[in-house]
Amino acid sequence: MFQYFVRRFLWAIFLFVSVTMITYVLFFLVPADPARLIAGKSATAADVARVRHDYKLDRPVYEQYWRFFDQLVIHQSLGRSFANRRSVNEMVGQAAPVTAGLVAGGAILWMLIALPVGILSALRPRSLLDRGAMIFVLVGISAPVVWIGLLLQYFIGFRLAWTPNAGYCDVFNPPAGATCGGPWDWFYHMILPWLTFAILFAASYARMIRANVMDVLGEDYVRTARAKGVPEQQVIRRHVLRNALLPVVTMLGLDIGVALGGAIFTESIFNLPGLGRLAVNSVFNLDLPTIQGVVVFATLAIILFNLIVDVLYAYIDPRIRLA
Amino acid sequence: MTSASPTPVAGTRGGQGPLLDVRDLRTYFKTDDGIVKAVDGISFSVERGKTIGVVGESGCGKSVTMMSILRLNPKSGSLDAAPGDDVPAKMESYLLGSKKHTSLSTGQALFGSEDILKVSNSRLREIRGSEISMIFQDPMTSLNPVHSVGTQLIEAVVLHQDVSPKTARALAIESLKEVGIPRAERRIDDYPHQFSGGMRQRVMIAMALINEPELLIADEPTTALDVTTQAQILNLINRLREEKGTAVVMITHDLGVVAEVADEVVVMYAARVAERAPVYGLFDRPMHPYTWGLLGSLPRLDVGVERLTQIGGQPPSLLNPPRGCRFNPRCTYAFDRCRGELPELVPASFDKAHLDACLLPEQAKVEASERVVASFATTAEAEA
Amino acid sequence: MRTRKLLGIVLLILGLVLLVATAASASPRAQKGGTLVMEETDDVDYIDPQLSYYGETWKLEQSTACKLMNWPDKAGADGTVVTPEVAAGLPVISKDGKTYTFTIKPGFKFSNGKPVNAKSFVDAINRFANPKMQSTGVAFLDIIKGASDVVNGKASSVSGLKASGNKFIVTLTKAAPDFLARLTMPFFQAIDPTLAGQIDANGINQYASCGPYYFSARTPNRSITLKRNPFYKMGRTANVDAIQVNIGNPQPVEYQNVLQGTSDYAAGGIPATEWKNVSAKFGLNKGQVQVHPLLDIRYLALNHGRPLFKDNPQLAKAVNWTVDRQAFAAQGGYLYGQRATQILPPGMLGFKRQGIYPLAVTPGTLAVAKKLAAGNTRDGNAILWAANAGVAPLQAQLIQYNLSQIGLNVQVKLLPRAQQFTDAGNPKTNNYDLTLEHWGADYADPYDFVNILLDGAQVTQPQHNNYAYYDVAKFNTAMRAASLLVGAARGTAYAALDANMMKQNPPWAPLVFSNDRNFLSARFSCVTINEAAAQGPLLNMACLK
């Protein structure tokens, strides 16, 4: 078990270095010149050169990468944004909790939807409930997140005014100039984003859970349980679900890890100052340090969640734990 | 026909009559290709403490019969038939018309005086695992991989016995010891994948017997195991049967197993019973051409042959069984009556307990049987 | 004695009556007070005066800054006249045009109570030039003597500045009549001694300012708050108590908010397709929907450095006769802009409607175009660059079609915007014959349009803005001469230059002068649109119904 851990850890480090390096290279392959952008349109060649020097963009790529890596590992700093010279650590640090809140709430919501829908559909295949559920699944998976978000925002936020149509409220320490804050405001503003974010996942998880449950219902040990006289409810609970939901746990962990990199569409539509929006803005501004900052964070999140999922799976599936 | 009589206390079935009396059992399935008549008029009975061997080819309906008795077929409907009804036709039209149900069983499975096919769901759950237990063919997949063996054993106990968790665990350990699992106190918390195939089957047996049922149905319990383990398991079943007085229905396709353990044999073919006899009677004087084929196709140790004797032809489809006697397309002795008339079980004149469903005159059958027996007499003697 | 006492009492009563009267008249006209709520889709870059370069920040600084020369709080053309603010009057300019002496008007105070003086401006320029600030606007300083030395690290303060009593004296490197217009840029606003000492390239987010308002709070990426400057009493209006800027809502949300009245001004814009609806609903320039021309142009730069347009004035003219400016504008939605057939936009000094080229395409205009183009299409192929986002691809297709009418086979190449102007401005990579460009004035002077974009001296620089690679000796001379003129003469000279270039050998095919479209809430009144100062409604003038 320990060896397993060590190996996974080393692999994680290798992954991290590769991802950051590739991001760096890709950025420099883009033909636009960030120095030119920063210098502004009235700048002369001398100005652009000066900016390039100030931002150390005139150094060779590998040197810049080494500088970045050194800064990251030794000083734990992600540098400063090209667009507004703010500390990237600070920007990512402020954005991450917003995304985390969105993802956590969304995950809870999507499981609350997917579990009953998936399980009930599996228990009553081809019934009206099942067919209805599968239509929901089809729509949820096919409909673009942006479309769903805009629809919800327009009908529920604007026309009906049941919820605010956009904006974010901090739970603790609302920033200076904020017009809302506190747990209730936060929750109220997150309803539509959670819904938008969750629908796609709810649909695909419902489908997956349904398939898994149907598979497991046909297993021999379910037949054994029935032959023992186990009541059907208990068969479902103790024998079917535990087996059917095992793969769901791994998927959940991985999906959360990836989503922490930034739910871009949802955040943009509802103006949530999270990592997704940060990433989009920094890409448009050719703001390399911020892009890198988000990439680093997202990579770490994914690696961490991968690890958690591996450990969790080993723990809950006795076949792996005691192999 | 009659609804369940007031619940008798389990285990105190009166000494009169057979423990299990199956009469005219039919089970049909609705599939995309049509109605599959998996069990089409089966009758047999099991006496207290005795072992019945049920033999037949794959697909002849042996397992379905047992599943039907315990009502383990999924999405099963129910049908009341009045005497004089054309039951098969009624069953077909019921299934075709039903949206929810894809299987249907009719007939009677009298357990004492209760018809299991008609009892309430709660009574059925009481019977299952406690008065009638069933073990299945593949021990690798018949146990839940995410629960320990102990959990699953204790579950069986707690469902049917009113005991404390501590007692239940003690009972579970005890049952593991009985089936020969070494270091049962430690092994009880192990998971199924930590046991070998044979061990797992022992666990299944322990689980089936922990509540001391009156009847154990074993559906090909040794087919998935190697020969040595097979012998061990059979011995175990035998021993337990002797110790506890449990009746056993042993489904198998292996005549050798039947010869070992059965008191009575039921030979099934194409969803119907071909022959039913006490075990010695079956081997001494088999009375059905199918049985002759079965016996003749046994490998022989004394005579070297190029190829084993087969029964010619294919097992019939249960969607559209052949008209008349279902064995007639493959039967070397078939004559014109066979093609039109569906034979019923008829007792032999020399033994009322020996029945067969063949239209040949008894004398012809006796002669043919003697020829068949003679040809493997040496083998049979060596085994006896 | 008694009469004096009586007089005293009478005066007292009179005074009280007057006091009450003024108090009564100053009481709720319901026009003062309240918080104006504004929306932006993206954050500003900095609010630090020497660093901020985004138009949206300058909008806000128009209410917070006090400058030597400023735009008046007036609408329309009146608002584009450079007027002294902290300067007591127009400066005294030396004969050689290089030395400006400003007298500082007393009475301006920062929001922390400190007074504004000549040193406040010296500090501002020194801070601006300080290489540690890494300001990207330093190009505008090159005209001040000694500034370049500071920028390049060779000196520690700008030698061309002097603060003497209430006089602020600036020496330039050469005569530059657009200098006064430059001073209206927020870079040059007065800063207090505290800010002068805060040298931080990351930008200061809280500082005292001397205009009607000051920045009271800023949370990057979330919001900016402006509050009334309690020490400001120099005449500019400050109607609302506070201005709250909320950042990040996408355009559809801003639109909804303003409609509902939860916000007052959608500064980030509303979805392009909604302009027609709101104009129909609320009327044009009657209240909530304000559309006015900007000092801004969208144009097709014709590359005179490449074979197709080199020494080919007839083809350049033909292009101007054939492009469909109406259809081009239509791509941007309702009220996108007005059709342009010349270089300088309306509202800019030197603008004179020339009427050289047609505003609409007809069979007649097409015939003229074909005649001009006949025999001049060289190899008949042309490469057109355009941005790959927004409406630019559509507009490029349109132009491709237009030019096919005169026998030019145009190949469209779509590029990311940043790459487009970077590569276009590089003499090594300008592999296009036409490029679809967009330019907005940094300050309202024709120099920023003509010299910056068309002076031939640039075309050999490694990075420049002369995308037409236009290098005509006589026009180079003319534009440099015009830049030295002042007042009406300056305007006339630039107007003539505009007309002559377009008549003789057009560097571009001008397409559209963009409109500034603003959507305001129902309660937003006292709307004063000043495109030179704020590109939109003046925030200090705004009041809430």
Image (spheres, coloured by chain):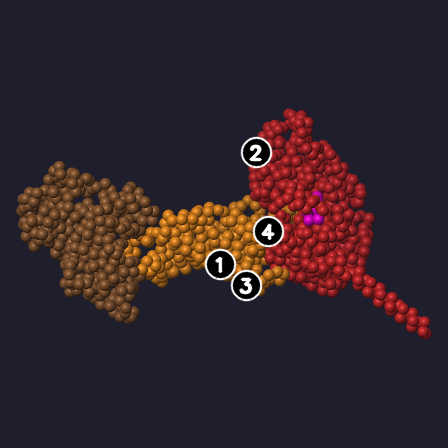
Chain colours: A orange, B brown, C red
Residue B221 in picture, x, y percent from top left: 20, 55
How crowded pointer 2 is (Cα within 10 Å; few <14, some 14-19, many 20+) is rated as some
Q: Please give the name of the residue rendered at 61% of the width and 60% of the height, measured from the top-left corner.
A: A178
Q: Chain of mark 4?
A: C
Q: Quick check: marks 3 and 4 in contact, CB under 8 Å?
A: no
Residue that protrudes farthest toward the bottom in the picture: C1
Residue at the disc numbered 3: A183
Label 2 vs label 3: CA separation?
A: 57 Å
Q: Chain of mark 2?
A: C
Instruction: Please name which of the two marks, 2 or 1, marks the residue nearer to the observer.
Output: 1
User: Looking at the image, is C364 positioned above or below residue B111?
Assistant: above
User: Residue B343's quadrant in the figure?
Assistant: top left
Q: Please give the name of the residue rendered at 46% of the width and 47% of the height, measured from the top-left corner.
A: A139
Q: Quick check: marks 2 and 3 in contact, CB under 8 Å?
A: no
Residue B378 in picture, x, y percent from top left: 5, 50
Q: Horizontally, is C515 left or right of B144 in the view?
A: right
Q: Please give the name of the residue rendered at 21% of the width and 55% of the height, measured from the top-left corner.
A: B109
Which circle marks residue A105 in the picture?
1
Q: Horizontally, is B32 left or right of B220 in the view?
A: right
Residue C377 in picture, x, y percent from top left: 62, 28
Q: Which residues are magenta?
A: C287-293
Q: Please, what is the three-letter code of the amino acid marked with disc 1?
A: Gly
How crowded pointer 1 is (Cα within 10 Å; few <14, some 14-19, many 20+) is rated as some
**Disc 2 with disc 3 on a shared chain:** no
Q: Quick check: marks 2 and 1 in contact, CB under 8 Å?
A: no
Residue at the disc numbered 2: C411
Q: Please, what is the three-letter code of the amino acid marked with disc 4?
A: Val
Q: Chain of mark 1?
A: A
Residue at the disc numbered 4: C253
